[in-house]
Image: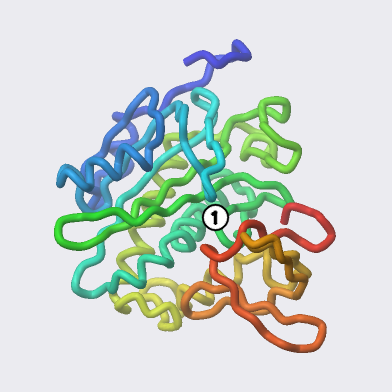
Amino acid sequence: MDTSHGTARAAIDRTRFAQLTEHLPLGTVEFRDSSGSTNTELAELATQGSAGHLSVFYTEHQQAGKGRLGRAWVTPLGSSITVSVLMVPDDSLSVEALSWYTMLAALAWSRAAERVAQVPVRIKWPNDLLAGEFKICGILAQMVPVGSGFGVVVGTGMNVDQSRDELPVATATSLRVASSRTIDRTELLAEYLKELVNLDRSFRQVSGAVQMPLPGFDGQSLRDMVSEKLATLGQEVRVEFPDGSTLEATAVDLADDGALVLQDPMGQRRQVLAGDVHHVRRADGKYA
């Protein structure tokens, strides 16, 4: 595989990927050399009944992807991991619990990246991952009709093999830049799915209760595990709302419904949901 910069990059090894994930209860697994949007294509398969729980859609080159609020998400050929996974609730999980799958995916990626790339990764509320103070991954979760109910397609784009000059903005980084070494994308993708499957299984065992200890995770709840990784907590942040108004306050907690709890200088607290805000940035202007 060649990039526009003329350097060879290895594609995901599908045979090895199958070996690394053969023990996982994945649904349909689709690999495409290129895709307009992995979220859109997996959502279509789900709506048609051709994809079930834990189905995976992966592409080496996403050409027309969208991030949160419709922002463009385009990946250079062979440099990232662009993958969407379909999560379908069963009797143990309410549709409301699906709102936590953005954080579930973020936690799975942080654990996978730290294990494979040895890069500390933290979560920026509501849907990004950071290496240091730089964005390394974006997440987009979309509700989709599945049978007589709904599921959620969780799309993620992890920057893996970009050099500094290939990154689109100064606030971005990649695992290659952060670790100063080449990362095995096949192993990393398999590890992400392993972590996601394990977290999903435990989340269902507690019926989606984010404050309950997750089986297999040392007695920690999902809310506790996410909060530990949340770089936003403790920071003075500036929140921009769709109507143009702003709020500057300290991020102090994560509510059971996933809302960010803010405290203003007068000690008053307010909760904001991801769907209600345009931007959440540190008050000092830094991305994190």
Name the side, left or right, on which 58 lies relative to 168.
left
Q: How many marks?
A: 1
Please tell me whether residue 288 is drawn above or below residue 64 in the rendered image: below
The local crowd at label 1, few if under 14, some if 14 to 19, many if 20 or more residues have their Cα within 10 Å, is many
Residue at x 54% of width, y 25% of height? 76
- Image x and y of residue 286, in percent: 79, 54
- Image x and y of residue 4, in percent: 58, 14
- Image x and y of residue 172, in percent: 68, 41
* Residue ID for mark 1: 110
Residue sitting at the far bottom: 267
Residue at x 80% of width, y 63% of height? 283
Residue at x 53% of width, y 37% of height? 73
Q: Secondary structure at mark 1?
A: helix
Name the side, left or right, on which 269 lies relative to 227.
right
Front in this rendered view, residue 284 or 278: 278
Please tell me whether residue 131 is drawn above or below residue 97 in the rendered image: above
- The quadrant in which residue 227 appears is bottom right
Residue sitting at the far right: 284
Name the side, left or right, on which 271 lies relative to 14.
right
Residue at x 47% of width, y 42% of height? 188
Please tell me whether residue 157 is drawn above or below residue 246 in the rendered image: above
Q: Amino acid at mark 1?
A: Ser
> Which part of the image, by quadrant, shows the C terminus?
bottom right
Residue sitting at the far top: 6
- The quadrant in which residue 13 appears is top left
The colour mode here is rainbow
- Image x and y of residue 207, in percent: 30, 77
